[in-house]
Image (cartoon, coloured by chain):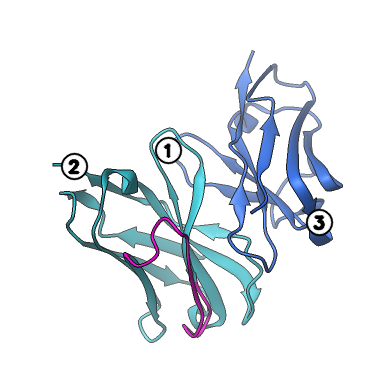
Amino acid sequence: QIQLVESGGGVVQPGRSLRLSCAASAFTFSSYAMHWVRQAPGKGLELVALISYDGSNKYYADSVKGRFTISRDNSKNTLYLQMSSLTAEDTAIYYCARDPGTRQQLNILDYWGQGTLVSVSS
Amino acid sequence: EIVLTQSPGTLSLSPGERATLSCRASQSVSSSYLAWYQQKPGQAPRLLIYGASSRATGIPDRFSGSGSGTDFSLTISRLEPEDFAIYYCQKYGTSLPYTFGQGTKLEIK
């Protein structure tokens, strides 16, 4: 069955960097856009970044633009989120999620990983 | 950016009852690009409804979505114990960013 498994979360000091990974399996990863969505403790859902199926198009929320970089390695079926200059406001569970559009972007999310917690604290 | 407002914030009902959750958009949502997700404690969200009224794969038919323009709703015809969760609406489409409502918590009365 389709699986998305995030890793790389943890506790990090303000101003430091962290890289999240999302390993995909049981579908043709290279055909689907992928998204990172985060959820602060006890809060709602927020789009962080998304990347087209081939990596040619990327979008970032204003709150992370210039600090976060989304990328993918289709040969490894893996999605990444490089996060830098982290602040307490970035503390959240980070989910990777698949966009169901094949070689297109529908901007809905049909499969989600279990999430990885990023906690920014001194 | 379209703002989605969900109501009520919390809905207290008993198993077997009918639940109706509302999602109102600050501007018209084009082509009914409105989705609903369910999130249980400690779990990732799950896609229930897209296109305002189409059920996602594997979603029971007690879940239904309706609406257009600025007013949308999610109805659960007969609540099962596993349906008590938080529900989020999402406006999607080509315009970014897409946004989520703040959520409605459906709790057991």
The amino acid on which the numbered mark 3 sits, given as a three-letter code, is Ser
Q: Colour of chain A?
A: cyan
Residue B32's disc number: 3
> Is A96 a magenta residue?
no
A60 and B92: which is toward the camera: A60
* Magenta part of the chain: A51-67
The amino acid on which the numbered mark 1 sits, given as a three-letter code, is Gly
Distance CA(mark 1)–CA(mark 3): 30 Å
Element assignment for label 1: loop
The residue wearing badge 2 is A121
Taking the spot 78% from the left edge, 21% from the top edge, the residue there is B17
Taking the spot 49% from the left edge, 65% from the top edge, the residue there is A35
The amino acid on which the numbered mark 2 sits, given as a three-letter code, is Ser
Q: Which quarter of the rendered picture does the C terminus of chain B lie within?
A: top right
Q: In the image, residue B15 lies at what x, y percent?
A: 70, 20
Q: Main secondary structure of the magenta part?
A: loop
The residue wearing badge 1 is B42
Please state the chain letter of the residue tagged with numbered disc 3 in the rendered image.
B
Distance CA(mark 2)–CA(mark 1): 22 Å
**Mark 1 or mark 3, which has the lower sequence index?**
3
Q: Are marks 2 and 1 in contact (CB under 8 Å)?
A: no
